[in-house]
Amino acid sequence: MKRIVAGVIGLAAGTAMLVGCSSDKGAPAPSSSQQATVAQGGSTEVKVDGADLAGLDLNSVTCVKQGGKVTVASGAIGGQQGLGIVMSDAATPVVESLGMVVDGNALAVANAMGAKSGSAEVKVDGDRYTITGEAVGADMHNPMAGMITKPFTVTVTCK
């Protein structure tokens, strides 16, 4: 259990660092029409290795658009699974960071300051975002086994 908590804390700290260190200098201050919009629930799907991510409370998934970013986050059932995504709010969004807990393993995609781990691609159809790729992380059940990679698909509605 301590390994799971340590992994989640490490993932959260890494995601916070990436978001905090990212730059949005080119974007003007948001006007009243650009203020935060929050969408919750909707038709969210999260699949890892082709199967639904068990333990994730899909009704808790929220999507917030603010300050040139789109942030997707979720709650978990029993604290076991979770999801967090930060991407640019552009015509062609780019995933800056993604973190998820799968079977007790903290997996991530990061793309900041020239450092890249994992991969993610975003397709937008109206208010529907589909993020696909591969997240990487350590196998917390067998840390000596090296890095693990899991394919994922996240589909979320964000207004």
Image (cartoon, helix red, strand yellow):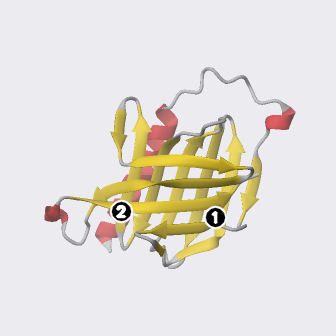
Number of dots carrying numbers: 2
Determine contact: label 2, label 1, CB under 8 Å. no
Give the x, y percent position of residue 63: 67, 54
Q: Residue at x 59, y 68 (%)?
A: 45
Q: Residues within 10 Å of mark 2 (few under 14, many from 20)?
A: some
Q: What is the number of the mark on residue 126?
A: none
Q: Is residue 98 left or right of residue 63?
A: left
Q: Residues within 10 Å of mark 1 (few under 14, many from 20)?
A: many
Q: Is residue 99 left or right of residue 155?
A: left
Q: Is residue 132 left or right of residue 129?
A: left
86, above or below 7, in the image: above
Amino acid at dot 2: Lys
Amino acid at dot 1: Val
16, above or below 67, in the image: below
Give the x, y percent position of residue 84: 53, 56
Q: Secondary structure at mark 1?
A: strand
Identify the residue under disc 2: 150
154, above or below 49, in the image: above
Q: Quadrant of residue 69?
A: top right
Q: Residue at x 37, y 30 (%)?
A: 114
121, above or below 51, in the image: above
Give the x, y percent position of residue 107: 37, 58
**Towards the viewer: 50 or 86:** 50
Identify the residue under disc 1: 61
**Of callouts 2 and 1, which one flags the residue occurring earlier in the amino acid sequence?**
1
Q: Residue at x 39, y 55 (%)?
A: 134
Q: Residue at x 35, y 39 (%)?
A: 116
Label 2, label 1: how many angstroms apart (C-alpha)? 21 Å
Give the x, y percent position of residue 156: 64, 60
